[in-house]
Amino acid sequence: MTTATLKGPRRTLAKAGLIVGLTLGGLFAGLPVLWMLSTSFKANGEVFQNPPKLITESFSFDAYTEILGNGAQLRFFLNSYIVAIAVTVLTLLVAVLASYAFSRFTFPFSKTINAVIVSVQAVPPITLVIPYFGLVVALGLYNTYPGLILTHMVFTLPYAIIMMTAYFNTLPKELDESVKVDGGNSWTALWRILVPISVPGLIAVGVYTFMISWNEYLFALALTRTDDMRTVPIGIQLLMGQHSYEWNQMMAMSILGSIPVLVLFLIFQRRFIGGLTSGAVKA
């Protein structure tokens, strides 16, 4: 049997293996989400019925009605939007300025500062809760939007700076020089030339930053006291009562909380992936 004869069956087996692997991976990732969606349409007493059913006779939107008709629950979403959007905008602004400096200029201790930024990524957030709590209280930022926003930026900025520095490194320095020849300065080169052509990288960093801030739980719990400052992850936890859990409402709120991130990813999917690969491959 020749080598050419063997290539056909091998390719078929490889394709079949790939299809099977992707199918199993899709089921592994999708079934929990499907079950969460199914649970959100059930009555709370039917969540653990045996045998389990994907769709029950009491199918209803009651859980969603309870969430969307409750002002306190809607406040959680408003808080998450305020914090996540503010964190995303401020992180992008600071990351662009810092990344441009690291990419285009040489200054004292630049390598040391860069190493510190990278090392922050390795620090487990839970180890910072107590000292950070004391710092936020001392600064008068406890149970406030600025306290949450600045805290989330501590964890989103290092990645944003690393990614944007790598992205700016892919852009030729001749672009900056051409602007200076025309009478411009570094500020003009950054905002008129580099930022407009770095949109894929900015989108990748922005979507990642929004996701991190939207889903953050630990510090949102530790740094807020009243329900009017809680975010969506904390709101879901508050549905766990002392004597009973509102499972259907928890799943409904989880679905509603997943929609903003899902919509962002679907809208910017191509540029998001392009931005990640550009920063990773060409840096």
Image (cartoon, rainbow, N blue to C red):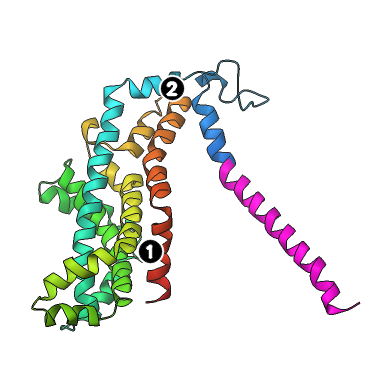
Which residue carries the number 2 mark? 63
Which region of the structure is painted magenta? 1-30
Looking at the image, the residue that sits furthest to the front is 182
Cα distance, mark 1 to mark 2? 38 Å
Secondary structure under the numbered disc 2 in the rendered image: helix
**Helix, strand or loop for the magenta stretch, by majority:** helix
Mark 1 against mark 2, which lies toward the viewer? 1
Which residue carries the number 1 mark? 275
Amino acid type indicated by mark 1:
Gly
* Quarter placement of the C terminus: bottom left
Q: Earlier in the sequence, mark 1 or mark 2?
A: 2
Q: Which residue is depicted at the point 56% across and 40% down?
A: 32
* Quarter placement of the N terminus: bottom right
Secondary structure under the numbered disc 1 in the rendered image: helix
Q: Which residue is depicted at the point 21% across and 31% down?
A: 228
Residue closer to the observer: 68 or 194: 194
**Count of all numbered marks drawn on residues in the image:** 2
